[in-house]
Amino acid sequence: MIYDFLNDLTGSPFIAGTITALLPLFAFILPFALFAVLLERKVAGHMQDRLGPMRVGYHGILQTVADIIKLIQKEDIIARNNDKLLFNIAPVLTFAGSYAAFAAIPFSSVFLGANIDLGIFYIIAVTGLVVAGILMAGWASNNKYSLLGAMRSAAQIISYEIPTILVVLSIVMLTGTMSLYDLSESQTSYFWNWYLLGGPEFEIQKFLLIPFMLIGFLIIYISTLAEVNRTPFDIPEAESELVSGYHTEYSGMKFAMFFLAEYANMFAVSAIVVALFLGGYQSPFGYLGNLLNINWLIPLEQFFWFTFKGIFFVFVQMWLRWTLPRLRVDQLMAASWKYLIPIAFFNLLIIGIISIL
């Protein structure tokens, strides 16, 4: 939709496509990453009864800007025995997988890169590039800690994609669409129409669906935590065991790209959860623009609500990081294969039976 508007404005498909492709990076991902790093430090600080960064800017708000400037100036070190080609490609590929996911994420009814019919399928597929990038980084680094971290990450992400896909299938089965835009539109602008509470289309079945939708919501949120390597599933980067895991050998902007990809992924998975279960960009209480009869205000309200919901779940991810201990490798794999996958499969069957009643 943004592309169509820019194409009409500029008259050039190339310029419209280029601006549309770069817009998520400069308008959202970079500012969000700067904000999220500061937020994580502040959350960690307050949970540990301290203040976090306080020196650079008011209450440390410019600390992450200073860190980016520092990383840009850092020397790009490549060890003699590294596989230089794969070593250089890995952080770019990892970031590209996270960045490409934003093409199908609907921030509002207007602020949407592409209304893809298979939006959720596209996001699950394209984020698979992250696994390839992480494996590439671990192998090319010629470092045993990096290789161990990469192998752990690949096993973890592939394992936890299965319960994620099973929960996504349950929503697709109910709604008949994979478009995140259509899913957001169908939940309308009041919280009792969200799929977490049974959705808008189902009347008799709605109350039967609620407990199973809550279970699906918990499963997909836990699974997405594991997919972005966040505590208690951060064994690929386990500092106490693997130094920093797959990015141990990286410095400067290549190191920064891994962290940029991680924070972009954190918001992307939160956005998926919001679009599937929590109304997407819809307001829980209706729109001020409708009340005042100001149509242009509605997309801005939608953008606010979508971003607010997404950042809230990012905050919960940070909260859990500084609350829970890290799982062992065997515990992490058992949580997926012994518990989440069977429960998600059973949940899918029950939702399917209820939906045809």
Image (spheres, grey):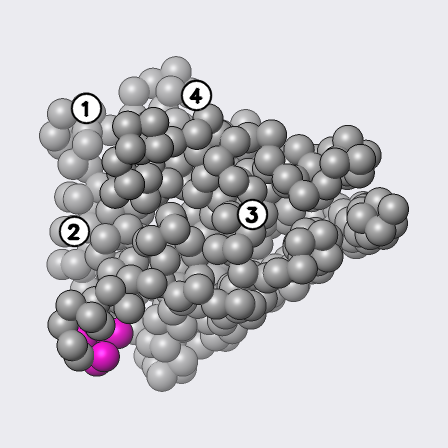
Q: Which badge, 3 or 4, is on the more N-terminal residue?
A: 4
Q: Label 4 belongs to which residue?
A: 47
In the rendered picture of this protein, how many numbered marks are placed on residues?
4
Q: Where does the magenta region start and end?
A: 13-18
Q: Residue furthest top?
A: 49
Query: Mostly what secondary structure, the magenta segment?
Result: helix
**x, y percentage for residue 191?**
55, 30
35 or 193, which is in the foreground? 193
Left or right of 212 on screen, residue 46: left
Looking at the image, is mark 3 or mark 2 nearer the viewer? 3
Tell me where residue 159 sits by quadrant.
bottom right
Q: Which badge, 1 or 2, is on the more N-terminal residue?
A: 1
Is 79 placed above or below 230 here? below
Q: Is residue 274 visible?
A: no
Q: Label 2 belongs to which residue?
A: 70
Helix, strand or loop under label 4: helix
Name the quarter where the N terminus is drawn. Answer: bottom left
Q: Which badge, 2 or 4, is on the more N-terminal residue?
A: 4
Q: Are marks 2 and 4 in contact (CB under 8 Å)?
A: no
Q: Distance of mark 1 from mark 4, alpha carbons?
A: 17 Å
Is 275 placed above or below 191 here? below
Residue 186 disc label: 3
Q: Label 1 belongs to which residue?
A: 59
> Which residue does the image show at 40% across and 66% down from the upper left?
114
Check residue 17 for magenta coloring.
yes
Q: Distance of mark 1 from mark 2, alpha carbons?
A: 19 Å
Looking at the picture, which amino acid does disc 3 mark? Ser
Q: Are marks 1 and 3 in contact (CB under 8 Å)?
A: no
Q: Which badge, 1 or 3, is on the more N-terminal residue?
A: 1
Tell me where residue 15 sits by quadrant.
bottom left
Q: Distance of mark 2 from mark 4, alpha carbons?
A: 27 Å
Q: Residue furthest front?
A: 293
